[in-house]
Amino acid sequence: MPRTLSKDDARIALAALMVRLARADGNYQNVEISMIDHVLVNRFGLNAGAAQALREQAEEIEVHAPDNVRFTRIIKDAVPYEERASVIEALWSVVLSDGDRDDEEHGFMRLITSLLGVSDRDSAYARQRADKAIG
């Protein structure tokens, strides 16, 4: 049984959102898993093993979470608005990693952006940065 999330655990909340986003199209691909691990390494300064363990924990928690509000509330409480665009950029990097942004992922991104209180404009800029970083 997965552990309960604490208010201080924005890392697991972000990881769970990335997993949920990658699974949104029903096709959880290795490229998306690799991108999630890459984001966790870069964002939180983890080594590869710790990032993989965090993602695996997030995969288990995500399956049992009834909605997205639980995760976004933790992130919103822990991350100041000025830094939330980088959260959106991390999420966009997962969407764009497989080269195919479908309707489910796009709709999910709009929902998460709204729940995090990030403007559509800031989300669009974050998407552009993520797209440029992926290359």
Image (tube, rainbow, N blue to C red):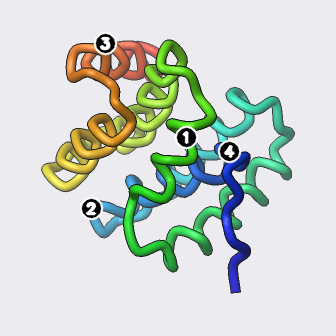
Check if mark 1's residue and mark 4's residue have beta carbons within 8 Å: no
Horizontal side of residue 126 vs 78, given as left or right? left
According to the image, label 3 marks what residue? 125
- Circle 1 packing at 10 Å, graded few (<14), some (14-19), many (20+), is many
Residue 135 picture location, percent across and down = 42, 18
Residue type of the residue flagged with mark 4: Arg
| Residue at horizontal 39 percent and vertical 58 percent from the top | 68
Q: CA distance from mark 1 to mark 4?
A: 8 Å
According to the image, label 1 marks what residue? 75
According to the image, label 4 marks what residue? 11
Q: CA distance from mark 2 to mark 1?
A: 23 Å
Foreground mark, 1 or 3? 1
Foreground mark, 2 or 4? 4
Foreground mark, 1 or 4? 1
Residue type of the residue flagged with mark 1: Ile
**Which badge, 4 or 3, comes first in the chain's sequence?**
4
**Which badge, 2 or 4, comes first in the chain's sequence?**
4
